[in-house]
Structures are given as C-alpha cells and as structure tokens.
Image (tube, rainbow, N blue to C red):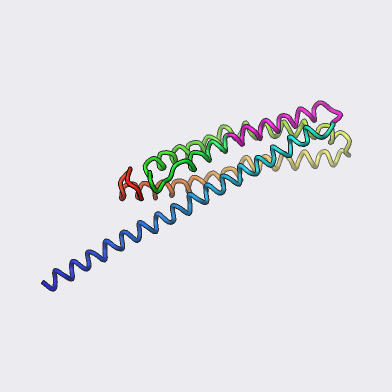
Amino acid sequence: MQDFENIQSLWQSHSVEVKISSGEMLDQAKKEVNAIRIKSLLNIGGMVLSFIAFSAALLYFNFDSWTTNLGIEILVLAVAIYTILLYREHRLISRNDFTEHPGAFLGKLHEYQLSRFNLYNRLYWFYVAAISLGFVLFFFETLHNLDTWIQVSIILFTVLWMVFCATILRKAFMKKEKERIDLLIEKFERISAQFGENGPI
C-alpha cells in the first residue's frame, strides 16, 4: 500500500511538472508574440513618419525641377504601399486572441510567415527600385549644383548602401526572422496539441 501511495505521489508530481513546462512555454510564446507585435507597430510608425516627411516636402517646398517633384511623388507612393502591406501583416497577428483560439492563431501565424517571405523577396525589389528611382530624381536638381567629386561620392555611397541592404542585411534579417517565427510556430503547435485546437489556454 505504501508503494502504491509513493507511485501515486510521484505520478502527481510528474503531471504538475508537465503543466508548469506548458505554462512556461505559453509565457515564452506570449512574450515572443508581443515582441513581434511591438516591432511590427514600430515599423509601421516609422513608415508613417517617412510618409508624412515626404508628403510635407512635396506640399510645402517649391522645387525648380519637375524631376524633384516626381521623385518625391514616387517616394510617397512607395512608402504608402509598403506601409499598407506592413499594416495588413500586423493585422494577421494582432486580430486573434491566441489564448482562446490557438489553432486559429497558428493558421494566421503560418499566413504571416508566408506574407513576410513574399514581402522580403518579391515586393522588396519593387520597394528598393521605387525608392532608388525616387531618390535619383529627387537629388537630380541638388546634385547638379554640387562639385563632381561630391556627386560621385553621394552616388557611390547610395549604390553601396542599397547593395548592402539588399544583400547582406536583408538575408541576415530574413534568416533571423524565419528562425524566430519557425520556433514560435513550433511552440504553438505543441500548445495546440496539448490543450486541444479549440480549447482555451
């Protein structure tokens, strides 16, 4: 009888440990989801500020060259489109309460991951091309009045910066974000399997 009670207490302590580990996993998942949401909001906020700055330049400054105005218009349009795409992505991870519907949130997380992949592969090149063209047209009037060596330095720096952002920085960011979202998806799959797809956590 004593052995049975020892086994029973051991079993109960073991199930308590499993519950604690699941709770810890959920806490980690909550922190990671909140971090992604905050980062997403900061990105959107930065893009909105850029949109306001470019729009203000377009509305309140008079430029002599039509290329400058066209460059700013292209920048405003590119930033507006990218901001809308970022907001759409943000809604994917902010609309569902993952504590009540982990299965539905998991589906949105997969959709978010695919959307991020498309954003940093196909749509990124549209954005870079539009921004580059916008800045070239914007600086055409300004660069014309500068010394040749300053013109070359600015153009060279801009090209190198764009290449750096489009290759090394973008790939490193994509890899880090993919690992982060993969880990989060794995956690939610475990949580959903343990608590039931439609059951509250």
Figure check: 93 above or below 73: below
* 136 lies left or right of 119: right
* 57 lies left or right of 119: right
Q: Residue furthest top?
A: 66
Residue toward you, 136 or 56:
56
Residue 81 is inside the magenta segment: yes
Residue at 38% x, 46% y is 100
Residue at 83% x, 34% y is 61
* Residue 136, quarter of picture: top right
* Residue 129, quarter of picture: top right
Rendered location of residue 173, percent (x, y): 56, 46
* 142 lies left or right of 171: right
* Residue 167, quarter of picture: top right
Figure check: 13 above or below 37: below
Q: Residue furthest left?
A: 1
**Picture quarter with the N terminus:** bottom left
Rendered location of residue 165, percent (x, y): 64, 42
Rendered location of residue 18, percent (x, y): 30, 59
Residue at 45% x, 52% y is 30
Q: Which residues are magenta?
A: 63-84
Residue toward you, 32 or 165:
32
User: Most prominent secondary structure in the magenta stretch?
Assistant: helix
Residue 146 is inside the magenta segment: no
Residue at 48% x, 37% y is 114
